[in-house]
Amino acid sequence: MSSPAEQRNIVFYPTGRWAISENTAWNVYLVGCGGTGSFIAHALAQLKASQPAPGRGLGRIVLIDPDLVEARNIGRQNFAPADTGYPKAQALAFRYNLAFGIDMEWVNGRFDASLLPKTSISLSRLLLIGAVDNGRARRTIAEALKKRSDDALWLDAGNGYDRGQVAIGNTFARRLLATSVDPNINIARYLPYPSLALPELLRDEPRPEPSCAQAVETEAQSLYMNRFMASIVGEYLRRLVAGQLGIFHTWIHLATMEMVSVPVSSHNIQRYSGPPSGNKHSAIADPAAFSEVIPIGSVLADQTTV
């Protein structure tokens, strides 16, 4: 079941505090270079290399990860045998700088708010991509964004064995979501941060969960799940840079090869403008809504199949 056509024409154009234009450079900080993050690095390099002119689209790209490449990562994450023993962020940056002639940067350590520029301006905006696999790491990202006075973007990707979600947003302020959409020009200036829309992302698992590499190795995660997630993140980025992003949540069920997205609309954004409630729309944030028996479209009645 699809949303009305007029709701599908609205795009996310985050001009709440700072203007953006075709000359805006998006400075991207990728937190996590493991299962999904290592493939997102390729998507970033591809997008950067395909830009028509320098200074437009993607600006700085900074890869952040504290881990070294291990033998078990080969073939399951985006690494080759020659990368073994090297820091993940550094290995990826070296590879794509050499292959595409770009200038990716890297941090061989954990993410910290001090790594980010203190503020954004209209021609230099901040986009934080979270490719982490636990609530603690996402809480660190959320806390870093709460301390900022600008509307930096947060694009988050997470998954289990064969199901995952991608979400993007730029505010924790529910009052801004109430008036996000300008009906005169069909743009939305604000979207809820992933942790506001999907608070379960910040929760700790009741028992230790395997890393992405361990999950794939023990068949607790589908081999191509991370690559699939990274492709969706790449398409979000491409549409954002082009001013064509008309969705803000995407759910994937790889077992049935189904994907469903939440369109940017006043109706869907205003769900998050008031206090949390237990209404039926909370099913949007519930991966359990995916079912091998019930088609996705019939479960999430307000979403659009992609």
Image (cartoon, rainbow, N blue to C red):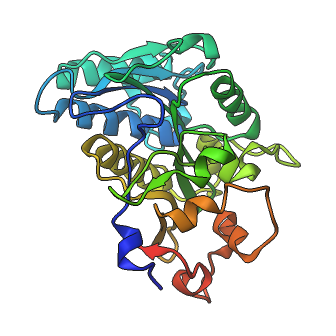
Q: In this view of the protein, which residue sits in the foreground, 41 or 224?
A: 41
Height in image: 160 above or below 298? Answer: above
Report whether residue 223 is seen: yes
- Which residue does the image show at 62% across and 75% down from the upper left? 290
Q: Position of residue 4 (x, y in %)?
A: 41, 80
Which of 229 and 219 lies nearest the eye of the viewer? 229
Q: Is residue 154 found left or right of 75 in the rendered image?
A: right
**Numbered disc total:** 0
Residue 128, given in percent of the width and then of the height, sits at 50, 31
| Relative height, residue 151 to residue 149 (above, below) | below
The image quadrant that residue 241 belongs to is top left
Whether residue 306 is visible to the viewer of this picture, yes or no, is no
Residue at image location 44% in from the left, 15% down from the top: 106
Q: Position of residue 273 (x, y in %)?
A: 67, 54
Which residue is at the front of the view, 93 or 177? 177
Q: Residue at x 76, y 52 (%)?
A: 200
Q: Quadrant of the C terminus?
A: bottom left
Q: Position of residue 25 (x, y in %)?
A: 30, 25
